[in-house]
Amino acid sequence: MNLLNELKRRNVFRVAIAYGVIAWFIIQAADIMLDNFGAPAWVFKTVTGLLVLGFPLALFLSWAYELTPDGVKKAEDLVTEDAAEAAAPRRRNGSFALILLLTAAAAAGLTWLAQSNPEPSAQQASVSVDVQAQAESLTNTGVLFASIQAPAGTRIDFLGDLAGPPVVSPDGRMIAFVASGADQVRRLWVRALDQPDPRELAGTDGAMFPFWNPDSRELAFFDGRQLRRYDLASDTIINVAAVGAARGGAWTEDGRIVYTHDFRSGLSIIGANGGEPAPLTTLDESPHTSHRWPFVIAGTNQYLFTAVTAVLDDMDNNGIYLGTLDSDAPPRRLMASNYSAAWIDGWLLHVSDGVLLATPMDLESATGSGRPVAIAGGIAADLSIWHGQFSASASGVLALYRPSGSETAGVQLGYGQAWQGGRVSLFAYNGRRVTGYTAGAQVLSTSLSRDGRILAMAMVSPNESSDLWTRPTGWQQDLEETVSGFSLPPQRLTFLPGSEERPVWSPDGTELVFRWDGDAGNPRGLYRMRIGGGAHTLVRDNQGADDHPTDWTADGRFLIISTDSILASDRNDIMAVPLDGGTEIPLITEPGPQFNGRVSPDGRWLAYQDTSGTSRIYVVPFVPAWPEGQRQRKWLVADNKSYVPRWSLEGDELFFVTETGTLMAVDIEATADEFSFSAPRVLFQTPWQRGGTYDPTPNAAENPNSFVFIDSDPGPEAPISLIVNWQSLLKEAE
């Protein structure tokens, strides 16, 4: 009996065909069911691998055994004694051939498995090592820890007013985030978790605070002017609504978008295709100055948001609220919190003291139903914009910002202190970075002396208050001769309790004026101090308000101030405070917020910022320099999202920055009685963020003005931290 006949007699071919058909059906069913259950990819590969390895085993069993009416028997027992002797040599040959066949089949199966798991690229390998190293002790729970690095040549914009923290798609397959390249332009990126490289989304310059639609096919984001939609399939963008300094959005399942159109507003709602927005929440400024970071709860008509106040002494009212769409019922307060929150499968995710917590909540009663469970520590919550720095999906993917890399150490970035990297840099007129003056510090504000040679900085101290420091700049009119700022030691100027902020130089560079919180014997107010020693002297009692200086006139006579804080008030006036003790002179007292007043070097013109509606730059006559009949004139120099005017030291240019941090310049021509100016022109992209300061250096024959900006250190930056299957941590705690 030859081998072929023997295989037929023992039904090996029939078993092979039946096994193949059944295995194919199992693979197809596993592909569908495991995907719906959100099982990791290795589960499907394991099922397929076992089926491949089981094939030669099935063939061997069909060769060695047969099913008879008397049960399963060895095939040898069914061979007649007469045929046994003749068949013995042929069976030995057939057995040898079958062994070769089984070996080849097993080798082919193992080869297929190896090819289905190719060697990872360098980027994938680093992630795989991280996952293995961090997850070895957690294999029983199935929780994996991993990280995603920023795209090559960029840094992820986690923090501040112009940020784009990572957001996980609802299906858990992708993460969107904002990153800046060498050109300082923020753009939107998407990383599919099963792909090694992220994808940059074209046309998203200036992107901030992205969020997903429910089916994970589109993203919405802000760019400082518009709420926009991006279709990932067609790479098309449409505008949805005009916005200001928006603070988050969320997409409803019926095709609407809930969003905060400005940093001091309630929530609005609009159709995802645009139209007329409608107010969703009413802002009561007695407890809160902003409603922000909406989150629509899946499968319901309810949503979360965070209500906060910028009044530092009144932040106990901050909290997470639960509202209902298309309802007149007022939102209900769930708990005290300073940060954004999420609600997934009955758990409220929120941040407290640098720890991400999950608290079981009853949606109907809006009350807690159990103790909170700690999910992750070391969260760098951003108090400057009240963002929790996390994003989670019901499918088990959690993205975090943990700059320390620690899983336990608590991190909290203080109010107004979310500058990434913390350095101050000198930029040439063409945008080239010349040198830096500090690194690794939290710099809140700066002021450059008029000769460009001494920099004053308000920097955060270890006790989280701020102090004033000075540092020589080494600046020379020939920038190539400018000494590296890091070689020049800084000197601490103030040692007062509380915080000293917003330094402004005297015109001769011998004194600084600043705002100080005060103490038991000194009121909160504006103080002056001589460089090189001397006591602080009260210039103006703020009566408990946050009034702050913005300029000191070139003749030394007046201090220009803005009343109150733009974050906590919609009424900010600009005043001139005579330093000889005379009566204060109102400069700008129109309705709405006006601030950042700067007087021209010749003392005749006042430039200021008006943020009533959109932010604009105006120039008016400086009241003390003009007779009564010539004080009412007014020029609109820059429209639509223009901030922080600065005169050149020569008075021939006026600079300002746009919402996205682009430095602009306007040529000025001013005579004894007339003021004229050119159209704005672009200079370069800066690292400026809302609330930041900058100053120009003097001009020179060979080199026009250079500029000192609060910058961010482009050194190593924390990646996006991932926790996969985070819900298992909740089960482990039960």
Image (spheres, grey):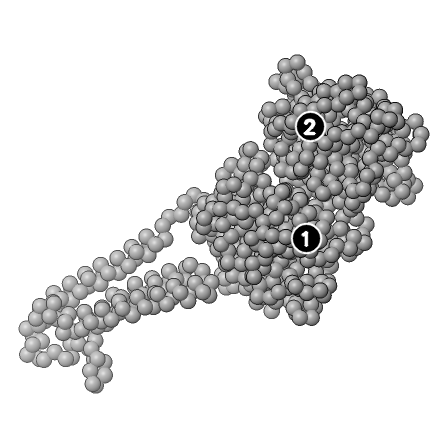
Horizontal arrangement in the rendering, residue 264 relative to residue 29 (left or right): right
Horizontal arrangement in the rendering, residue 480 relative to residue 578 (left or right): left
Residue 446, picture quadrant: top right
- Residue 497 percent coordinates (x, y): 84, 40
Q: Nearer the viewer, residue 365 or 662?
A: 662
Quadrant of the frame with the C terminus: bottom right
Q: Nearer the viewer, residue 258 or 55?
A: 258
Horizontal arrangement in the rendering, residue 510 relative to residue 235 (left or right): right
Residue located 11% across and 67% down the image: 3
Q: Secondary structure at mark 1?
A: strand
Q: Is residue 658 visible?
A: yes
Residue located 15% across and 70% down the image: 7
Q: Amino acid at mark 1?
A: Arg
Q: Amino acid at mark 2?
A: Phe
Above or below, 230 against 514 in this view is below
Labels 1 & 2 near each other (Cβ < 8 A): no
Q: Secondary structure at mark 2?
A: strand
Say few, some or many: other residues with alpha carbon within 10 Å of mark 2 (under 14 / 14 to 19 / 20 or more).
many
Above or below, 277 against 22 in this view is above
Q: Nearer the viewer, residue 456 or 283?
A: 283
Residue 292's label in the rendered image is: 1
Residue 232's label in the rendered image is: none
Q: Which residue is mark 2?
A: 655
- Residue 396 percent coordinates (x, y): 53, 60
Above or below, 378 against 731 in this view is above
Quadrant of the frame with the N terminus: bottom left
Quote the CA–CA distance across marks 1 and 2: 32 Å
Nearer-N-terminus badge (1/2): 1
- Residue 650 percent coordinates (x, y): 73, 19
